[in-house]
Structures are given as C-alpha cells and as structure tokens.
Image: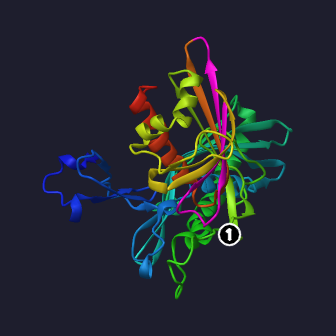
C-alpha cells in the first residue's frame, strides 16, 4: 500500500482530482489530492468476485478461489473408495484436513487450475480374524503439476500391531493406486464447475449482467464457523431476477465495550472516520433508516437495532445484481472481565461468487479500519 500524496509525479488530472479504486469493493471516487488515500499496487490476478465483467475476448487474468469447493469434492469422491483382498478390507472414511489453496484462473481465453494442498485422510478396515483397524494417510502435496507417480503417501495405523499389518499392506497395494487416479480428476472437475464463472461464453456481451454461477451443494453438511459459507439457495432480487445465494459468517474480537462498538456502526461521525469519507446517505440509525457508504458502493437499510447487542441491516454491494440485498446480522458479545467484545457477523443472501470478496473486504475496510482508527485491537 502506498499513500498517493507520497508518490512523486502522480497526475491528479483535471480539476485536481483523481480516480481511486478500492479494488475489492469496486469503489471509484474523485477526491481532492490533499486527502491521503491508499492505492493497491498488487500485481496479483483479480478474484472472480471482483472481476470486471467487461472483459473483451476473455483477455484479462481472472482468478476464483475454489478451496472450499475442492475440500467438499475430496470428501465426496475419496470416501467412495474401498478395496478388499479375501477377508481383508479397507476404505477411506473421511478427509481429516486439507491445507493449502485451490484456484481456477483464466487469461487470454484459457482456463487453468492452480493448486497445492496437503491432505490427511482417515481409513478403516478389518482383517481375516475380524480385527478392526484404522489409521491415517497423509499426502504432503497434491498439486496441479504433480504427476501420478509423484504423489507421496505416508500411511500410519492407530495402535500399531502385527495383527493389523495386513490392512496397512492392502491400503498401500490397492487403495493408494485408486487415490492417484482420483487426484488426477480434480483439474477437470474444477474447470467444469467453475470455468464458466470466470470466462464469458463466445459471442456473449460481457457487460450485460453479473454471472449467476451454479451453486455447489456440499456433501451432506454446512458449517457456520468463522469466515465460512453455507449451502447455496436461490432467491429473487428486487428487480425480479433469480439470484443464486449463500450464507457468509465471520467472527472478530475487539478490545472495547459492546456499547462503543455499537456506536461505531451507528454514529455517522464514527462511520465517516473509519470509512475515510462522510456517508453519502445516512437517514439515522433507526428502523427503516437508509445509508450509503464508500461513495454509494455499500448501501442498505437498518432493519433492527438492540443497543448495544444487535444490529440487523439489509446490505448490498453496488456490483451485485440490481435490487438484490443480503440480510446482515451483527451481534456484539462483551466479556465483562476484560472488556473484550466478540462481533459475530452473518450475511444471508450473498450472491454465489461474491463470498470471497464480501469476507475479504469486510475484514479490510470494516474490521481492520475500525481497529486502526479507534485503537480497538491488534491487527494481525
């Protein structure tokens, strides 16, 4: 990040104004050069949630985070694997963990996958004398450029003993080859599921509307822990169009009271302080009160207020389908011992494909900005 008024020779243009891109919110503002602003000079490709839809000939680099989807894919497909040799049997039970990143990218009309993850799987089985066996299979690297013969499998048994060795041998001999085959299917599955979200179809007008990707249904469960998303649903926007939506959650700690944090989200002067500009519209923190922040790129209506515990808003980004709002629930839970307040946030109705941009920019332009501006906590 660089402060623009520290950049020598920056051309502010006619009238002494410049265009400022808050990259992930898609915010463009004209501000006098005397105001200190920041500009992201990162050269990394844009996420799909922030992609500029006018992308002629699919020329620009667009990137979509598919990490959560990939973990569900592994869970769904690897747990179908089972082998046997006479009375000895073995199968994959679950994916214990997946660490790393999975992206689908597009540039110059070509869709590619870029990923590198570590997998830990749990397996179980039985021997001829009906001894139950279970353990783990660790694959240190499953990557987009790994050949089938290059995968490494570390196989361990819980409470190892000689009577359990036949199951471990079976896993090595027959289950591992099946895993190699499944890992090679991931790139095709990723492109089939996500490629259409980051690439315009031939002959289409790339500036007509936001894409409405097909929602991925996780295998039998959804999670509501910090920063995670729920299963996708479909709902109508205010303009009548059907929008595939999902739920996004986040949890953060602030070293202040719930009362102070509540005021930060409802006092126009505090809003102006951490957003770095007065609200474009603010009808008051009351039921039905409308607001527009970041030059109108974030807008909504106060639906419910319970001071100092709870705020409910209709909330949207300007880049979302016209007339479509999510419902934003903000809850403040104060620990009276050390005056630390936990803020729990849940958006319902976030358009599919906008999860990452919503979480990332809530963290940057709300959470981190509030902590920096008011000293409400450490920024990691």
Q: Residue furthest left?
A: 9
Hey, which quadrant is residue 20 in on the image?
Answer: bottom left
Residue at the spot 52% in from the left edge and 26% down from the top edge:
254
Q: Residue furthest front?
A: 283
Mark 1 surroundings within 10 Å by alpha-carbon count, few (fewer than 14), some (14 through 19), many (20 or more): few
**Image spot of residue 65 (x, y percent):** 52, 57
- Label 1 sits on a secondary structure element that is loop
Q: Is residue 45 visible?
A: yes
Residue at the spot 58% in from the left edge and 54% down from the top edge:
355
Residue at the spot 79% in from the left edge and 53% down from the top edge:
84
Up-down relation of residue 93 to residue 339 (above or below) = below
Name the side, left or right, on which 271 lies relative to 347: left
| Span shown in magenta | 310-337
Up-down relation of residue 89 to residue 44 (above or below) = above
**Quadrant into which the C terminus falls:** top left
Name the side, left or right, on which 89 lies relative to 105: right
49 vs 9, nearest the viewer? 9
Query: How many discs mark residues in the rendered view?
Result: 1
**Image spot of residue 111 (x, y percent):** 48, 73
Q: Main secondary structure of the magenta part?
A: strand
**Image spot of residue 211 (x, y percent):** 59, 71
293 vs 324, nearest the viewer? 293
Q: Residue furthest right?
A: 130
Q: Circle 1 is placed at which residue position? A: 239
Up-down relation of residue 266 to residue 313 (above or below) = above
Residue at the spot 47% in from the left edge and 39% down from the top edge:
271
**Image spot of residue 361 (x, y percent):** 48, 48
Magenta span contains residue 7 = no
Q: Is residue 13 visible?
A: no
Q: Residue furthest top?
A: 337
Name the side, left or right, on which 234 lies relative to 307: right
């Amino acid at each position: 990040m660089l402060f623009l008024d520290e950049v020598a020779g920056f051309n502010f243009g006619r009238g002494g104004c410049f265009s400022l891109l808050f990259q992930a919110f898609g915010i463009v503002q004209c501000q006098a050069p005397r105001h200190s602003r920041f500009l992201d000079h990162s050269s990394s490709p844009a996420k799909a949630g922030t992609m500029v839809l006018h992308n002629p000939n699919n020329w620009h680099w667009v990137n979509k985070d598919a990490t959560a989807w990939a973990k569900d894919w592994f869970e769904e497909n690897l747990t179908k694997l089972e082998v046997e040799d006479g009375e000895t049997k073995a199968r994959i039970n679950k994916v214990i963990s997946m660490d790393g990143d999975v992206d689908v990218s597009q540039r110059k009309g070509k869709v590619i996958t870029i990923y590198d993850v570590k997998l830990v799987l749990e397996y179980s089985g039985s021997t001829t004398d009906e001894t139950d066996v279970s353990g783990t299979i660790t694959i240190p690297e499953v990557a987009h450029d790994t050949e089938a013969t290059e995968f490494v499998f570390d196989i361990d048994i819980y409470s190892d003993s000689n009577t359990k060795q036949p199951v471990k041998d079976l896993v090595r001999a027959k289950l591992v080859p099946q895993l190699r085959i499944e890992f090679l299917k991931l790139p095709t599955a990723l492109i089939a599921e996500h490629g259409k979200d980051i690439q315009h179809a031939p002959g289409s007008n790339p500036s007509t509307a936001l894409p409405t990707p097909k929602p991925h249904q996780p295998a039998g469960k959804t999670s509501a822990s910090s920063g995670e998303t729920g299963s996708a649903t479909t709902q109508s926007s205010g303009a009548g169009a059907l929008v595939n939506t999902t739920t996004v959650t986040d949890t953060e700690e602030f070293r202040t009271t719930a009362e102070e944090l509540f005021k930060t989200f409802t006092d126009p002067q505090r809003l102006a302080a951490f957003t770095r500009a007065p609200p474009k519209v603010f009808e008051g923190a009351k039921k039905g009160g409308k607001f527009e922040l970041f030059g109108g790129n974030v807008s909504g209506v106060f639906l419910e207020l319970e001071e100092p515990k709870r705020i409910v808003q209709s909330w949207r980004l300007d880049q979302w389908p016209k007339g479509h709002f999510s419902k934003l629930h903000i809850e403040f839970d104060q620990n009276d011992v050390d005056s630390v307040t936990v803020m729990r946030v849940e958006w319902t109705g976030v358009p599919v494909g906008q999860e990452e941009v919503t979480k990332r920019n809530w963290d940057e332009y709300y959470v981190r900005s509030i902590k920096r501006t008011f000293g409400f906590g450490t920024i990691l």
